[in-house]
Amino acid sequence: MAVVVTGCAVSPVADVKAEASKALEIHTDTEPLAERLPKLGRIVSAHWQQETPGGDSRVPGPTDYRVSALMRLAPGSVADLTASTQMQPATVGTAPQGISIPAALSEFAPPGAQWVHSGVLDKSLVRADSAQLCFDPASDTVYLSATNVDRPMDVTVPAGPDGN
């Protein structure tokens, strides 16, 4: 019995088309964000992207997704959200409190933003596997970087071994 193995070649044109299809769309609708982030208050405008890092739509099962969003809130909202929490400066591009706004969204960031951050607000305002919120009080802008943001009512508690 003989087994014949043949190779598959991918043309450069196919690679370029695949890369072009990976370009992330910039969304401006606020409803999907408002549904998942009700504690932020009224979102006046937004520019956001959603990606599935390493995701392959041909593979069944859950896929992680990452959301990056610049959201403008109603006037005074950021001051209200940050008033009772110790905020730390957040610098663009530096860790651990830094933020990395994707290039496609950076043009929508407020010029001269003075970003601040609090891990307490990350946990209390967003239900997600991981989330970081940065605030610019002067422009009432919030930057969100999160993985698997849940709708507040979609969160379920898994049953234990006894079914409870």
Image (cartoon, helix red, strand yellow):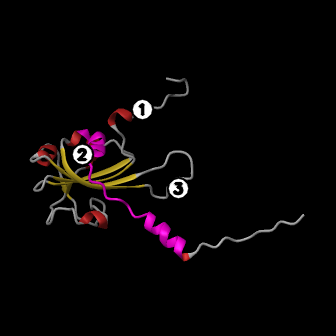
Q: Is residue 125 magenta?
A: no
**Residue drawn where x is 54% and y is 76% of the image:** 12
Of the two numbered discs 3 and 2 on the same chain, state the one appearing first in sequence.
3
How far apart are the alpha carbons under marks 3 and 2? 32 Å
Name the disc covering residue 121, or none: 2
Tell me if mark 1 has few (under 14), some (14-19) or many (20+) residues whose alpha carbon lies within 10 angstroms of its own.
few
Q: Residues within 10 Å of mark 3 (few under 14, many from 20)?
A: few
Quadrant placement of the N terminus: bottom right
- Please, what is the three-letter code of the amino acid marked with disc 2? Leu
Q: Image check: 155 left or right of 38?
A: right
Q: Secondary structure at mark 3?
A: loop
Name the one closer to the observer, 67 or 158: 67
Q: Which residue is mark 1?
A: 156
Magenta residues? 13-38
**Amino acid tagged 1:** Thr
Q: Position of residue 118 (x, y in %)?
A: 23, 50
Residue 67 position in % (x across, y down): 35, 53
Residue at position x 52%, y 53% in the image: 57
- What amino acid is labelled 3 in the image? Asp
Label 3: which residue? 56
Q: Which of labels 1 and 3 is toward the front?
A: 3
In front: 129, or 19?
19
